Image: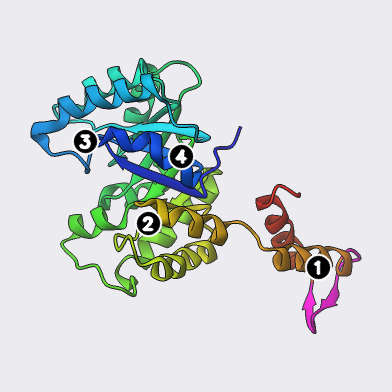
């Protein structure tokens, strides 16, 4: 079953009490983050706290994952072992750069566990097609980590990551892997988030990383086709059923039929 990823909400592993609260915003995926959101000295404590919190009150979101620390760090193996026995649906594997690592993670988890991978380093982005061909359940593009790896600077316009953002989307399409767009770290700038999500949607992304519950509703609005979009998609299919037609004064043909079917598929109305 394809993983729904319109909104992937990350919750700091150091504050596991938030896990029970974020369900109010109804994200598609909740991620308890043991990586970036936890200082090195607190890793073990946060891991234990997340496992305990999930056992006591697992969020009612569609999918609950634990983001483990990357392979090669002192915490990776213990994170995986804890996640394998936790009340979660799988893990998020950050800094994905080696297909063998995905296989090792799957081997460490129960059968059927979900694995979402992060393409957020220069090597990960450069090798995205081969990495995603290994078949993760979903992937995300991490712009902040990529720019840090490259020694660049993040800008409001995002031109510095447009090539990588597009390359990851292309690789995910070829691998038929659902893919989640970059984070917006200005967590209370809902309009900025909405605009950036719309750019990701236009590139073909399926959803957005969310760092605050306020971002979840905006993600759902952007990545769920509107009533007007659905109505136009149906008009395109009706008008071009014989090969070519005109809708709203514009010619539509086979490529527009494919686009219209994509809109309906995203709404579950294929």
Residue drawn at 30 percent across, 73 percent down:
156
Q: Which residue was labeled with disc 4?
A: 23
Which circle's residue, 3 or 1, is located before the other in the chain? 3
What's the CA distance linking mark 2 and mark 1? 31 Å
Q: Is residue 63 left or right of residue 234?
A: left
Q: Is residue 240 left or right of residue 199?
A: right
Between label 4 and label 1, give the one nearer the viewer: 4
Residue 236 is marked as: 1
Q: Which residue was labeled with disc 3?
A: 14
Which circle's residue, 2 or 4, is located before the other in the chain? 4
Tell me the crowding category of disc 1: few under 14, some 14 to 19, or many 20 or more residues within 10 angstroms, Cα based.
many
Front residue of 13 and 161: 13
Residue drawn at 26 percent across, 57 percent down:
144
Q: Position of residue 115 (x, y in %)?
A: 42, 31
Residue 182 is marked as: 2
In the image, residue 247 lies in the stretch drawn in magenta: yes
Which circle's residue, 2 or 1, is located before the other in the chain? 2
Residue drawn at 36 percent across, 52 percent down:
212
Residue drawn at 13 percent across, 27 percent down:
74
Magenta stretch bounds:
241-252
């Amino acid at each position: 079953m394809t993983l729904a990823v319109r909104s992937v909400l990350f919750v700091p592993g150091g504050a596991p009490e938030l896990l029970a609260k974020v369900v109010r915003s109804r994200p598609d995926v909740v991620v308890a983050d043991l990586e970036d959101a936890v200082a090195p000295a607190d890793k073990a404590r946060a891991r234990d706290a997340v496992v305990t919190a999930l056992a006591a009150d697992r969020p009612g979101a569609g999918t609950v994952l634990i983001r483990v620390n990357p392979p090669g760090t002192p915490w990776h193996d213990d994170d995986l072992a804890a996640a394998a026995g936790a009340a979660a649906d799988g893990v998020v594997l950050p800094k994905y750069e080696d297909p063998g690592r995905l296989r090792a993670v799957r081997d460490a988890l129960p059968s059927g566990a979900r694995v979402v991978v992060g393409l957020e380093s220069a090597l990960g982005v450069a090798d995205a097609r081969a990495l995603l061909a290994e078949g993760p359940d979903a992937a995300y593009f991490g712009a902040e980590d990529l720019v840090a790896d490259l020694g660049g600077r993040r800008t409001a316009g995002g031109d510095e990551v447009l090539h990588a953002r597009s390359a990851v989307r292309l690789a995910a399409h070829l691998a038929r892997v659902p893919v989640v767009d970059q984070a917006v770290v200005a967590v209370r700038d809902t309009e900025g988030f909405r605009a950036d999500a719309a750019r990701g949607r236009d590139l073909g992304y399926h959803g957005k990383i969310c760092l605050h519950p306020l971002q979840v509703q905006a993600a759902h609005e952007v990545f769920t086709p509107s009533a007007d979009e659905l109505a136009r998609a149906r008009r395109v299919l009706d008008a071009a059923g014989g090969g070519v037609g005109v809708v709203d004064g514009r010619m539509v043909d086979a490529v527009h039929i494919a686009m219209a079917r994509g809109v309906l598929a995203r709404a579950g109305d294929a």
